[in-house]
Image (cartoon, rainbow, N blue to C red):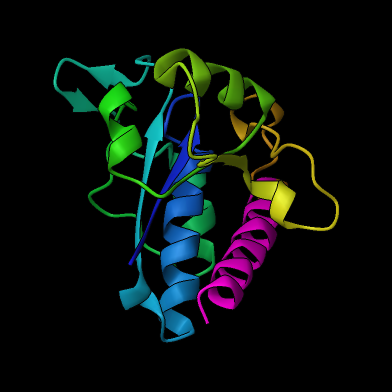
Amino acid sequence: MTRILFVCHGNICRSPMAEFICKDLAQKQGVADRFFVQSAATSSEEICGTVGNPVYPPAKAQLEKHGISCAGKYAAQLRKDDYGRYDLFVCMDDNNIRNIFRIFGADPQKKVCKLLDFTARGGNVADPWYTRDFDKAYRDIFDGCSALLETLLQENN
């Protein structure tokens, strides 16, 4: 089983969207049992005490528009000891990469990558918290998750 952790700044928009899009794609392809998928934040901004904030309403609405539920998801923060728990840390942008290295210190097993690097175009998934373009974020994340799953399935066959 491949253990994937999607990572963004606050874990209320992009990374939970990626978590649930990836789970949905894997389920539809009949390979959900081959993956353990979660998401987390590099910051603690969306964590209130021991409980994180729920998925940001426009991100939740975007998922629902595509028939995907994120019910029960609350922001969680990435911890240094997560490095040993996951096979792949899939970040949304360059800032997430920098922040993840601050948390982990290093990446000796080359587990850290960016989502859109699995696509032909590469680049960053723009943060819809700032752009307000949740449609574009969904499309980018969908494309990235589709390419990620295709890559992982090809590698493990």
Classify the position of the N terminus by image quarter: bottom left
Q: In this rendering, would 38 be left or right of 6?
A: left
Mainly helix, strand or loop, the magenta region?
A: helix
Residue 138: image location, x then y, percent:
63, 53
Depth order, front residue of 53/145: 145
**Residue at (59%, 26%) from the top-left corner?**
97
Q: Residue furthest front?
A: 108
34 shown above or below 11? below
Q: In this rendering, would 122 be left or right of 126?
A: right
78 shown above or below 31? above
Residue 128: image location, x then y, percent:
63, 34
Say if the magenta span includes residue 61. Answer: no
Q: Residue furthest bottom?
A: 30
**Residue at (85%, 51%) from the top-left corner?**
121
**Residue at (28%, 43%) from the top-left corner?**
85
Residue 74: image location, x then y, percent:
27, 38
**Residue at (50%, 42%) from the top-left corner?**
111
Residue 11: image location, x then y, percent:
42, 33
Q: Quadrant of residue 114?
A: top right
- Span of residues in magenta: 137-157
Can residue 64 be seen from the camera position used here? no
Q: Quadrant of residue 112?
A: top right
Q: In this rendering, would 121 be left or right of 131?
A: right
Q: Residue furthest left?
A: 50
Depth order, front residue of 62/37: 37
Can residue 120 be seen from the camera position used here? yes
Number of dots carrying numbers:
0
